[in-house]
Amino acid sequence: MLLGGRVAGPLVSLAGLLDEVHQARASIDQVGHVLNRPNERQALTTGLRPRFEGAIEFRDVTFRYEGAKTPALDKMNFKIPAGTMLGLVGRSGSGKSTITRLLQGINRDYVGSIRIDGTDMREINLRHIRKNFGMVLQDNFLFRGTVRDNIIAGRPGLSFEDAVRAARLAGAEEFIERLPNGYDTFIQEGSPNLSGGQKQRLAIARALISDPRVLILDEATSALDPESEALVNANIQRIAAGRTMVIVSHRLSSLLDCDLIMVLDQGKTMDIGPHKELVQRCAIYRHLWFQQNRHLAPEGFDDESSQPAIV
Ligand SMILES: Nc1ncnc2c1ncn2[C@@H]1O[C@H](COP(=O)(O)OP(=O)(O)O)[C@@H](O)[C@H]1O
Ligand SMILES: [Mg+2]
C-alpha cells in the first residue's frame, strides 16, 4: 500500500500538471490571437472626419467571420435616411449584431460597401466613427467608481454638467437623485446595488453623453423585467430626437415606434418597412408578431404551422 501510494502520488500530480499545461497553452493561443491581429493604428489616425448626419447604406455587404463556413451577412442591402429609427428583427444568428459591429468598424474585412452619408466607411477615420456612434448592449460593464465617473467613463473634456444632461435624457436622473449620495454614490464592480433597469439607464446615459449621431441598442432591454423595459422604452422617443437609431430587439412590441423595421434571415434582408406594412406583406414578420401577440391573431392562426419559427 505504502509503495503503491508513493508511486501513484506523483503520477496523479503529473496528470494534474498536464492539465494545467493544456490550459496555459489554450490561454496563450487566445492571447496570441488578439495580439497577432493587425492593429488599427493606421485607420485610427488617417481618414476623413466628416460631420455626420447619420444616413446609413449597406451595398451588397458580405461578411464572413474568420473560420466560419457560411457568411454572417450575405449581400446585404438597405438604405436609411438620417434621423431614422431603424428596428432589426430576425431569429438568433441572422446577423443583427454583426450589422452593429460592422457599423462601429470592429470588423472591417467585409466585401461590398457601407456608406455613412454617402461616404464609404473605409475612408472615414475610425476614432471619429466610434466617437459619433454610441452603443448599448444587453449587459454593460459598470466599473468601481461613482455614478458620475461611470457616465463620463474617462472621456476627456466632459464635465459634470454633461453627465447630468445625459442622465436626464436617459431617464436615469430620477433614480440617481434618490441614491444616498446622488451622482457621487459609489458603485461596486458588477453593481450589485443597482437594478437591471437602473444599470441600463446608466449605460444609455454613458452612450448619450457625447451626443452621438448614431445610437445603437443591441438587445438593450431584452434582459429587463417588463416594468424596467417600459421605463427605458418610454425615453427612447426623446433620446431618438435628432439622431439615427438602430435598435435590435426580439420583442416586437418595443419596435412599434420605429420608422422602419428590417427583417433579417440568414444574413439577408427579407423586408424593410414600417410595422403596418410588414404585418400585411412579410410572412416571417407577421408570424412573429402574432406569435407574440396572440390576442390579436386572426382566426385560425397556427403557431405550429410551417412558417419559420423565430427566436
Ligand atoms: N465572433 C464570431 N465568430 C464566428 N462566428 C460568429 C461570431 N459572431 C457571430 N458569428 C456567427 O455569425 C452569424 C450571425 O451572428 P450575429 O450577428 O451575432 O446574429 P444575431 O445578433 O442576429 O443573433 C451567426 O451564424 C453566428 O454564429
Ligand atoms: Mg445578437
Image: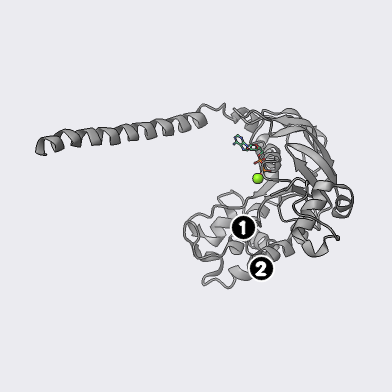
Q: Secondary structure at mark 1?
A: loop
| Residue position for label 2 | 227
For this view, does 287 lie left or right of residue 20? right
For this view, does 243 lie left or right of residue 163? right
Amino acid at the residue labelled 2: Glu
Whether residue 241 can be seen here: no
**Which residue lies at the image location 67% right of the left edge and 45% below the top edge?**
92
Q: Quadrant of residue 127?
A: top right
Residue 225, how many percent across, how many down? 63, 64
**Which residue lies at the image location 80% right of the left edge and 65% below the top edge?**
295
Residue 280, how many percent across, how many down? 89, 52
Mark 1 crowdedness (10 Å alpha carbons): few <14, some 14-19, many ≥20: some
Where the N terminus falls, by quadrant? top left
The circle on residue 283 is: none
Residue 291, how many percent across, how many down? 76, 56
Amino acid at the residue labelled 1: Ala
Residue 256, how many percent across, how many down? 80, 58
Whether residue 138 can be seen here: yes
| Residue position for label 1 | 223
